[in-house]
Amino acid sequence: MSQVDEIRMQVMWNRLISVVEEQAMTLLRTAFSTSVREAGDLSAGVYNAKGAMLAQAVTGTPGHVNTMAEAVGNFLAAIPRQNMFPGDTYVTNDPWLGTGHLHDITMVTPVFNGEELIGFFACTAHVVDVGGRGFGADGKSVYEEGIQIPIMKFAERGVVNEVLVSLLRANVREANQVVGDLYSLAACNDVGLKRLLEMLDEIGLPNLDKLGDFILSRTHAAVMERIAALPKGAWSNELLTDGYDEPVNLVAKVTIEESRVHVDFDGSSAISRWGINCPMIYAKAYACYAIKCVVAPDIPNNAASLAAFEVTSPVNIVNAERPAPVSLRHVIGHMVPDVVLGALAQALPGQIQAEGAGALWNIHISARPAAGHEGRRSEVLMFNSGGMGARPTLDGLSATAFPSGVHTMPIEATEHAGPVVIWRKELRPDSGGDGTFRGGLGQRIEIAPADGHEFEFSAMFDRVGTAPLGREGGLPGATGSVALDDGTKLRPKGWQFVPAGKRLVLNAPGGGGYGDPANRTAESRAEDLRKGYVTEPGK
């Protein structure tokens, strides 16, 4: 390939990324659920005719993007080529074939140029409700957690499956939001399809074969070069998390070979009887993300970069088999990067950040009028974040969703979604672990039912009993807490009740510090005190 051809291909690669970014923005702008519209809890991508991911949107989470990269192959296995037609859209929320739990809807749309099938667009979004027990850890099996949609057609030749829509409406609490989100997902893929065909027509290509080969071959070569420069060997790490009613231990062994990085979770805790289990597809997504953050952060994420990383596990909490309850699979899944990074820190000392809060401090609220009052019922989902671990040369980021990458939802959007009042949402002083570089701060959030209302909420919090550890001599971050404003302690997981007139108080954990605290500069300590990150000198 000539230099001019290579430049032309690179330009088209960038153009393809802009296509999937417009695809994702369509979902952001049309979604009904605040978790999608405000927090960006979604993914979007384009695939070749064999189902290999060529490009992903910048907008989105690693858990959605990397599971979706594998999920498209599951769609192709379930729907034969002869049953694919222009105007089709396929759908599922199967946790083991999609993105790990029932609340995520994945849609795949085939792209035809004339009679030729040239690729696929796929997207995923978290919807506010799927029926069942709701978004929480209390289910004893996936059958209690909501309606299951097997891989099937949402639309065939442009005609929507109204039977499926009717079944969904009859099984969810927020029918208009959920069905609206399904149409948003379908529209998202349609925009990508339209823009891709316009692009191919403009540049004179009949399909994605030539561009796809360029993308995957260049990515493969770049990743192999990075892996070749790494030290070779095997390193293991353990990480203790709160679990539901007993702690959960995660174990990762990272082996770096000449042309691959292998992660094995043998030794991790057994499947839980509560809904914190993680299907392998989701654990794999976050393990690959952790490796890529270290090995190839600047190399585009696609099928070739992901193929360099292999993830295995016996059946356990990160490889939970059907019908295990998996509604809160993100709680364990978001801890996977820290346990993997802990192993990589042994291979690459001085280069890996400290542990952070990990799992999002999501809260699902089911609000209703209190006895003797009128009002509306509503399902409200709110995302909050603890602090990131400190980095080898920088303080940790405060109130930042690592590893998920979702945005913190604005208070105004949350209050608009249902009868709740957010009285406080601020950084939590003294929560970041001390060190040469300080861990990021968590948040303090106070939520109350609106006047004349009460609510139940699903707690899905971690790092309450087990603190994020520092690295290279840095101190742990502060643990979190869950309570009412009268001091009543509440459980960090499970459905619980907040009566009218009370406030729920959440203290999200802070990140661990990095390096010996004695080496933190006087200027940095003075700045910590001035900004209110700490309340006492030297703390």
Image (tube, rainbow, N blue to C red):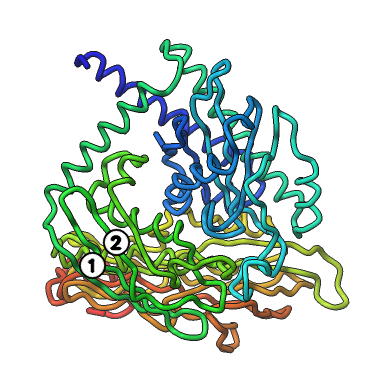
Q: Residue 102, image x and y in percent?
A: 61, 58
CB under 8 Å between discs 2 and 1: yes
Q: Residue 490, image x and y in percent?
A: 57, 84
Q: Residue 142, image x and y in percent?
A: 62, 67
Q: Residue 297, image x and y in percent?
A: 27, 47
Q: Earlier in the sequence, mark 2 or mark 1?
A: 2
Residue at 32% across, 21% down: 11
- In the displayed structure, does residue 94 sit left or right of residue 444? right
> What's the amino acid at mark 1?
Ala
- In the displayed structure, does residue 207 sit left or right of residue 505? left
At label 1, counting other C-alpha atoms closer than 10 Å, the crowd grade (few under 14, some 14-19, many 20 or more) is many
Question: Which of these two is toward me, 87 or 365?
Answer: 87
The residues bearing labels 2 and 1 have C-alpha atoms spaced at a distance of: 10 Å
Number of disc labels: 2
Residue 83 marker? none
State the residue position of label 1. 343
Circle 2: element type: strand
Question: Which of these two is toward me, 74 or 489?
Answer: 74
State the residue position of label 2. 263
Q: Quadrant of residue 103?
A: bottom right
Question: Which of these two is toward me, 336 or 501?
Answer: 336
Circle 1: element type: helix
Residue at 55% across, 87% down: 489
Q: Quadrant of the N terminus?
A: top left
At label 2, counting other C-alpha atoms closer than 10 Å, the crowd grade (few under 14, some 14-19, many 20 or more) is many
> What's the amino acid at mark 2?
Val
